[in-house]
C-alpha cells in the first residue's frame, strides 16, 4: 500500500464515521429550502 492509498483510506474511514442525517431530517431541510425559495421569488406558484 502506498502513502496516497493510505491517506485515501483514512479519509474514507473518517467519512464513514460521521453521523448520517436521518431521512425525515433531510426531508424537513429540503422543504425549508423550497419554502424559502418560493418566498424569495414571490408567491406566484
Image (cartoon, rainbow, N blue to C red):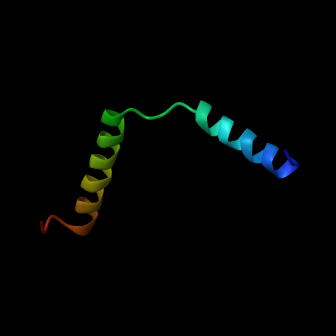
Measuring 67% from the left and 36% from the top, which residue is drawn there?
14
Q: In x, y percent, where is residue 4? A: 82, 51
Q: Nearer the viewer, residue 6 or 33?
A: 6
Residue 40 in the image: above or below residue 34: below
Farthest-out residue, right: 3
Assign the N terminus to one quadrant of the image: top right
Q: In x, y percent, where is residue 30? A: 32, 48
Q: Nearer the viewer, residue 30 or 6?
A: 6
Query: Which of the 4 quarters of the picture holds residue 34?
Result: bottom left
Assign the C terminus to one quadrant of the image: bottom left
**Position of 42 compared to 4: left or right?**
left
Q: How many marks?
A: 0
**Position of 13 compared to 41: left or right?**
right
Residue 24 in the image: above or below residue 7: above
Q: In x, y percent, where is residue 40? A: 28, 64
Measuring 59% from the left and 35% from the top, which residue is drawn there?
16
**Position of 2 compared to 40: left or right?**
right
Farthest-out residue, left: 45
Q: In x, y percent, where is residue 22? A: 38, 32
Q: Nearer the viewer, residue 17 or 25?
A: 17
Measuring 32% from the left and 53% from the top, which residue is drawn there?
33
Query: Which of the 4 quarters of the picture holds residue 37?
Result: bottom left
Q: Nearer the viewer, residue 8 or 32?
A: 8
Farthest-out residue, front: 1
**Position of 5 compared to 36: left or right?**
right
Amino acid at each position: 500500500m502506498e502513502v496516497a492509498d493510505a491517506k485515501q483510506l483514512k479519509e474514507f474511514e473518517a467519512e464513514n464515521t460521521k453521523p448520517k442525517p436521518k431521512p425525515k431530517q433531510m426531508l424537513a431541510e429540503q422543504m425549508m429550502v423550497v419554502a424559502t425559495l418560493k418566498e424569495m421569488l414571490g408567491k406566484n406558484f
